[in-house]
Image: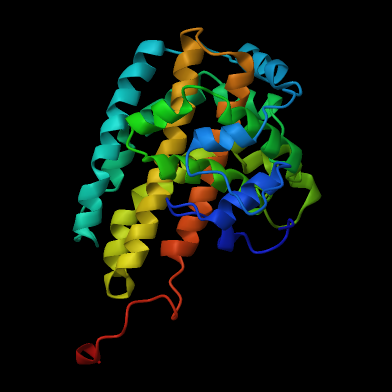
Amino acid sequence: MAYGTNPEDRYSYGEVSDEDRREFLQALGVIAGGAVAGATLRDLRAEVSSGAAGGLAEMGEAVRGGLTGTLDATLLNEELAALEESFELLPQLAAMGTPEQGASAYQELTTAAWAINDHLSEVGFFASAEANLPAFEPAHIEETTRQLLHIDALPATLSEIGFATEEQTALVTNIVNSREQLSWWMATPDYPPAEAVDDGVVHEYVAPLHQRAAEGSLLWIDGLDHYLWQRAPLVTEEMIDRGLWDTKSMLGGYYLLGSAARDLAAGDIADDHLTTLTTASTAIMIISQEFLINDVIRITDDKRAPRNPASN
């Protein structure tokens, strides 16, 4: 399916259809006939070659060299451990459904991620990532996704934070199958300078791309307690379920980003893996918040819960 078509049809909510896998493989140059790769990351890895790294190591080296402060491995370890506990709370949110007035269950999911975020911002990680990594162009999306499949530790890392086998596959296939959303997110320098526009967004007021994706994800999650309570009569069980997958995906993306930063602090990550994980984790967060808007925030008449005649 070409760029510019409706990507919503290809977004997987934790379960990956044969068509989703076929679309993913074809985008990466694998022509899948009647037989489609299985549902695990290792199945996809067997189908997709890693290819040439295409300068990913040099990009990662530049990101590392562009830091303006020192990453704190101890802080990152502690906050990542706290973030792991957030994933354990997701089943409780599913059982809760619509939050009550004044609830903070969703907001509590992001406490550790905000601490990681503040630290990454302070040491210049986001600024360095934007300065040294390309924006989400098709070739970069495809190249880094190929490399992501060949990171040996990825399945175990995602499993540790509660992503089942097929959910892991959905996270990765969504990067490529929902690539149109990624193309909408520009790097800060691509926005016009203030003197060039009379009205609109200018680059002086736009955060670095990876920071924008990360903080946007956390802000959307933080707002769900009030938003869902305020619109309780309109919210359906399907909206809650889809919103929770989007939330889990955003947190998963943030966990991968934080893990890459922790390993960088410890000197325990290859430069090409740093590029790959920074790009892929940001992509996951972007895609998830784009679909959260469609799944939960914009409630159209065709999606809303049925009206209660007794309330009329």
Quadrant of the drawing holding the C terminus: bottom left
Q: Is residue 129 above or below residue 72?
A: below
Tell me if residue 276 comes above or below residue 196 in the rendering: above
| Residue furthest out toward the right | 196
* Residue 151 place in picture, x, y as percent: 54, 24
Residue at image location 50% in from the left, 22% down from the top: 152
**Horizontal arrangement in the rendering, residue 181 relative to residue 3 (left or right):** left
Whether residue 211 is visible here, answered yes or no, is no
Q: Residue furthest top?
A: 267
Vertical side of 302 occupied by 119: above or below = above
Q: Residue 64: horizontal and vertical position, in percent?
A: 61, 14
Is 306 situated above or below 20?
below
- Image side of residue 110 versus residue 253, left or right: left
Residue 163 horizontal/vertical position (percent)? 37, 39
Quadrant hosting residue 54: top right
Residue under the point 40% across and 40% down: 165
Query: Residue 182 versus residue 52: which sits nearer the camera?
Result: 52
Residue located 44% across and 17% down the image:
262
Please state if 182 lies on the left or on the right of 243 as rendered: right
Q: How is the image coloured?
A: rainbow
The N terminus appears in which quarter of the rendering? bottom right
Q: Is residue 254 visible?
A: yes
Q: Position of residue 297 (x, y in %)?
A: 43, 63
* Quadrant in the rendering for residue 133: top right
Q: Which residue sits at x=46%, y=8%?
A: 266
Which one is in front, 26 or 210?
A: 26
Number of numbered discs overlaid on the protein picture = 0
